[in-house]
Amino acid sequence: MDHSSSSPVTRALAALALLLAWALPTSRLAVLPAERALAVAEAGICRAGQRTLVVPAAWSPALPRVRFSRAPNGADSELRRIDSAAPFQPAATRQWAAEVLHLLLVAVAVAALAAGWRLAPLWVIAAVVLFINVHEPRADAYRLLWVVESPRLWWQAISQWSLSLWAERLVAPALACLSLLGAVAMLLHALTRGAPRRIATFLSINPRRLS
């Protein structure tokens, strides 16, 4: 097996940054397809309920007012919730399966880095490109720093963010860039390894041998 001679520190940093960048998508696997379908169905019901609860301008006090319960009780209500989620079940299952495949690619990249494979940087680059295309990380924190041009004001703004926003818009973009830089550094190291020796060998060739 052909191993890469890149620095173990570089491989470890690239693997750690890649794992941390994918930490939030990995945590979402705990939401199973049935729960995702229920969430989509309930979101649609809530939106429909909000549209239904619009009171007309010519509302008559004599007309009976209907109360809408946002938390239905009983077995019949639970069955209705499950039935309403059934149409969304296939799409939720496909989404969950696709996320599992994405994480398998990340696992292969990390395993390749740990084993020191020469093609490990390519796996890392593929995992980073997949992360950017699928999750579209937004570096809002860094754009905000560029706009306000004041670290104090910038910190006051992002200190009010939730932990999920910190992970999504501050940490994940930086870690994805770090893992990508590590992969590029390993590729450059692999391409330039032995180059001085090859150049010296080429320059030391006797011109008579070429005739």
Image (cartoon, grey):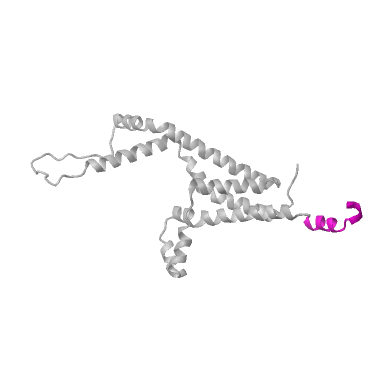
Outermost front residue = 211
Residue drawn at 50 percent across, 48 percent down: 24
**What residue range appears in magenta?**
195-211
Counting every numbered tag in the picture gives: 0
Residue 133 image offset from top left, x and y in percent: 51, 47
Image quarter (top left, top right, bottom left or bottom right) of the N terminus: top right
Picture quadrant where residue 68 is located: top left
Residue 64 image offset from top left, x and y in percent: 12, 39
Is residue 23 visible in the rendered image? The answer is: no
User: Is 86 in front, or is 128?
Assistant: 128
Residue drawn at 30 percent across, 41 percent down: 46
Outermost left residue = 62
Is residue 174 visible in the rendered image? The answer is: yes
Residue 36 image offset from top left, x and y in percent: 41, 38
Asked if residue 5 lies left or right of residue 131, the reply is right
Prevalent SS, magenta region: helix
Residue drawn at 58 percent across, 46 percent down: 127
Query: Does the magenta run of residues contain 11?
Result: no
Residue 128 image offset from top left, x and y in percent: 57, 49
Asked if residue 6 lies left or right of residue 178, the reply is right
Is 79 drawn above or below residue 200 in the view shown? Answer: above
Residue drawn at 65 percent across, 52 percent down: 12
User: Is 121 in front, or is 7?
Assistant: 121
